[in-house]
Image (tube, coloured by chain):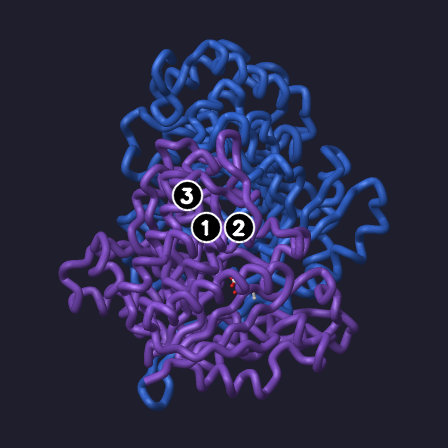
Chain colours: A blue, B purple
Amino acid sequence: MTQRILVLPGDGIGPEITRQARRVLDACREAGLDIDIEEAPVGGAEIDRSGVPLAPETLEKAKGADAILLGAVGGPKWDTMPDIANRPEKGLLALRKELNLFGNLRPALLYQQLVEASSLKPEVVSGLDIMIVRELTGGIYFGQPRGRETREDGTRYGYNTYVYDEHEIRRIGRVAFEMAQKRGKKLCSVDKANVLEVTILWRDIMNELAPEYPDVELSHMYVDNAAMQLVRAPKQFDVIVTGNMFGDILSDAAAMLTGSIGMLPSASLNESGQGMFEPCHGSAPDIAGQGLANPLATILSVAMMLRYSLGAPDMAARIEQAVGAVLDQNLRTADIAYEGTRQVTTEEMGDAVLAAF
Amino acid sequence: MTQRILVLPGDGIGPEITRQARRVLDACREAGLDIDIEEAPVGGAEIDRSGVPLAPETLEKAKGADAILLGAVGGPKWDTMPDIANRPEKGLLALRKELNLFGNLRPALLYQQLVEASSLKPEVVSGLDIMIVRELTGGIYFGQPRGRETREDGTRYGYNTYVYDEHEIRRIGRVAFEMAQKRGKKLCSVDKANVLEVTILWRDIMNELAPEYPDVELSHMYVDNAAMQLVRAPKQFDVIVTGNMFGDILSDAAAMLTGSIGMLPSASLNESGQGMFEPCHGSAPDIAGQGLANPLATILSVAMMLRYSLGAPDMAARIEQAVGAVLDQNLRTADIAYEGTRQVTTEEMGDAVLAAF
Ligand SMILES: CC(C)[C@H](C(=O)O)[C@@H](O)C(=O)O
Ligand SMILES: CC(C)[C@H](C(=O)O)[C@@H](O)C(=O)O
């Protein structure tokens, strides 16, 4: 049966990186993958077109798709929009919420060919391979009540609500425990249980799940310590599981440890295996349209899509091998280029991956 | 007039590091500083004694003191206490709140003698000197409502409230702008204004303050990006201002960049200049009582106390110079020792600082 893929290029470098990823998807189709690809605007591009970051018909298409490939959304052009409910980011948050994509997988993997690109000492990061499992549809990102108001005495105040129930915690916990089972069998749950009640519940539920996964070693760490340990000795981690807000912060820090955030894909999955796949990096408006962007994170997001949503792990492995091969050929986009490597454009990088596929 | 200092050793390594810091305070008194020193238990030590982490009489003493020197609180012994309201950390949080110590100054300063101790490449961190200004008595740490409950259908949930009003934001903003004026004149305000309404207000207030400090260059950064930039290129920052939760996470990451968290002091100040001073590191129960702890962060906290609360900047500078001198003498506690340096105990480090004072 034909599987349906929706490509949402978005803003900034989104269009140029998804263009290269689409070429890889086309190559997969030629190699026998039965897929149908459609494209739609989202984020700032859609605001410019229709006034909202996610059009109702695009949401419908997304719901009907087996998998979504997203470029990136946002940029300074829309940052000053007074109405937060209508900024590019809200399109992304709405997709996550409406499709129930609660399970966000964010690998922080160091490519040995790029060890020099890290700001950390080679011995600290060489071989780094962490998987961050971030809860994506709950927590303070979506908690009610929220808003800005003015008190009777004229004082303005703002508030958000950090809330989780046990079901939300349990289902992301299961994703993380299962991920740990497939990897190094170590799971570190990150919370702030010495201060925040909601994360005491988080810790309780993780502890309750642990006996079901006796082969996984569960530990707990406060978020401030986790931020420190990621800098000090990141290789101590295998799988990290945490809530939406802490996951946002820690996954970006972890990604940056590798020195090659332009290389890192991500997956956001729901309970039926439907997923949205996107690079970890943002829309980089400052370099958009210049052929400088690194398409590899988006191409590797296609590999994650094949593995997690389309049931084509072999094809996924072929893409990953092709990416490894172009790195071995010493080809680099600007973000990961250094002396002795050959700098190529976004499109040339796509060419090289296709040639190695 | 005699100024009153309350020393709260706390738990873990707290007693041994404050012991060395007291010796430095004694030396200051002998050198002419008119102070009176009293000591009291807090945190786990006080729980063991009286059942609560902060005794009412200790709180009264703290209110009456001109400055407080705190070691560290907490440890595994009390981590499993079911009642979060009675854990060691609550003693610390109550002191902050009751004394209105909203302005938390956390320097992340790299000592050139210790550049090798960092997990980052020397060129990335050499010369690093960031000041993080963290709001300490508001935000999600203290927001109401908060708690854990069970819904009618039996589902457990937990919640906390992230709330700020404009006055709270403005007063910490002023501390940060003034700090930037005294330093490199660059202030970066960290928020998550693309998702959290409370931090949109935060950003608005910072922008409203900016015209009063025309010599300071204000910028804004999302917290996930800030965590990345601290890893990638930390020297881009001068002063960072942020809320309680983000400040907890970012200040620990920034401190760890220096590779010598055992060196970093902190100050928590209220509007009348009264302050609590403590090392950035924790109570390190695993090494307590073995003479391994580094007393320098606590000794440097005494220097901050002299500068910010006791009006004795010259004496503060003398302490800081003495600490620089012992590093130049190649003396190191275990946490910062490496080949070619001389490892000393906690007390020997105290001896050396006193000799150089
Ligand atoms: C763009 C923004 C809303 C988003 C988030 O905070 O989740 C991004 O930072 C991410 O991590 O995917
Ligand atoms: C011990 C804990 C409550 C405290 C905090 O989170 O503020 C600590 O981490 C700190 O940063 O001083």
Chain of the residue where label 3 is placed in the rendered structure: B
Q: Position of residue A59 (x, y in %)?
A: 51, 49
Q: Position of residue B42 (x, y in %)?
A: 60, 74
Residue picked out by circle 1: B352
Res. A160 visible in picture: no
Q: CA distance from mark 3 to mark 1?
A: 10 Å
Check chain identity for marks 1 and 2: say if they share one: yes
Q: Which element type, helix, strand or loop, lies under badge 1?
A: helix
Q: Which element type, helix, strand or loop, lies under badge 2?
A: helix
Amino acid at circle 1: Ala
Q: Which element type, helix, strand or loop, lies under badge 3?
A: helix
Please tell me which residue is depicted at 66% across the width and 56% down the height of the picture: B289
User: Is ligand 2 within 8 Å of the beta carbon of the residue shown at mark 1?
Assistant: no
Check chain identity for marks 2 and 3: say if they share one: yes
Q: Position of residue B254 (x, y in %)?
A: 43, 49
**Viewer-proximal residue among B188 and B8:** B8
Residue picked out by circle 3: B327
The mark nearer the N terminus, 3 or 1, is 3
Please tell me which residue is depicted at 19% across the width and 58% down the height of the picture: B216
Residue picked out by circle 2: B348
Res. B21 visible in picture: yes
Amino acid at circle 2: Glu
Amino acid at circle 3: Leu
B282 left or right, relative to B307:
right
Please tell me which residue is depicted at 33% across the width and 62% down the height of the picture: B316
Q: Position of residue B95 (x, y in %)?
A: 51, 77
